Amino acid sequence: MTEQDFILKNYNANIDNGSVKWTSPSNIALVKYWGKKKHQIPENPSISFTLSDCKTITEITYTKKDSKGFSFDVFFEGNKNEAFKPKIQTFFERIESYMPFLTAFHFKIETSNTFPHSSGIASSASGMSAIALCLMSIEKKLTTQGNSTNDQAYFNKKASFLARLGSGSACRSIEGELVVWGKNDSVSNSSDLYGTKFEADVHSVFKNYQDTILLVDKGEKQVSSTVGHQLMYGHPFAEERFKQAHVNIANLKTVLATGDLNEFIKIVESEALTLHAMMMTSLPYFILMKPNTLEIINKIWAYRAQTDSKVCFTLDAGANVHVLYPESEKQNVIEFIKNELVTYCQNGHYICDQIGQGANQIQL
């Protein structure tokens, strides 16, 4: 599909008001996206686990208005939040050509997270995908019966397409369990425009895969992801990194089919460290890992060597550590975390989650 396929041509102007509500999860990339072109197009493909319990719940109430321009209020966990408005304003500006009804209504956006906002978990993926899904539900109500937006596959693709324009990784939060974003020759249905559900064979060992998130640092990052992506322009190792991501997705596709956890560990941990290596070798260079991030990594390596466990780690663009492991190891790994890793978490905080199925609409 192309961008033109997502332009809404006609809608019912006689609907005056309504409300829609969605819950959408966060996700954690196994092969990382770092660096983007214009219009939120990724420089390299990525693949992620969709999470289950770390999610955003968003309700949008819309009321027809006569004035021109965008009109919206944002409430976070019950309180009006002006800080979120600029990002949503930018999002609306980017998607107006695909949703011309945005200027016809005033929107009340009420949102909350199932995880603490100050936890250091990036909420842009879950937050922007939840808004995109709500807007798609509004579009569906405004379009006549039989319009293509009533088709679920189209609905999901356009929701992902829109979410990408709010936050790149948000396009991977619409569906589950594994989602690919970015064109890659080894994944036939992959696209730069939206995330696609990974449809190839997946070994049973990856079902209900566990992700325990160790909250090493809850503070605001010293360098934002937006700035970090921009620093890939002119980066001395960028082109080789982009090639590496393509190779790793092809290799991971085989690993996911065979259930080879040793190879899974190699790819996932290498990807995490490569992401941070790109940060440390950009100009200006920066480090988002903290001393306790490294302590946890070394503890995981030691535990794996001692026990032959298949536990491994990945990192997002921050200091927190995602501990990944098969469900069969849950009891042992949780004990390991409590006994040896929790001391490196800020205030001893960590969140237990697992692979999930994607977003869900909440009926009002």
Image (cartoon, rainbow, N blue to C red):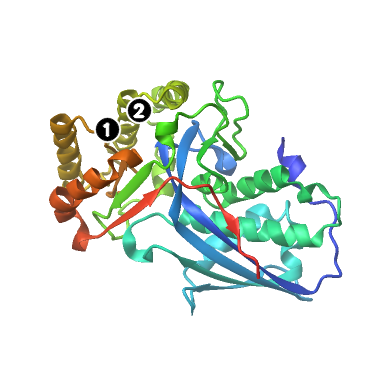
Whether residue 121 is visible here, answered yes or no, is yes
Question: Distance from label 1 to label 2 (Cα)?
Answer: 9 Å
Residue located 14% across and 34% down the image: 302
Task: State which quadrant residue 361 falls in.
Answer: bottom right
Q: Which residue is located at x 15 percent, y 44 percent?
A: 295
For residue 264, which numbered disc appears in the image? 2
Q: Secondary structure at mark 2?
A: helix
- The C terminus, quarter of image: bottom right
The residue beneath circle 1 is 310
Q: Is residue 361 left or right of residue 257?
A: right
List x then y, in percent, for residue 51. 44, 49
Please state the horizontal and vertical placement of residue 314, each as a whole percent of the image. 32, 39
Which badge, 1 or 2, comes first in the chain's sequence?
A: 2
Q: In the picture shown, does residue 277 fall above or below 132?
A: above
Name the foreground residue: 166 vs 335: 335
User: Percent from the top left, x then y, of residue 207?
Assistant: 44, 38
Q: What quarter of the picture does the N terminus occupy?
A: top right
Q: Residues within 10 Å of mark 1 (few under 14, many from 20)?
A: some
Residue type highlighted by circle 1: Lys
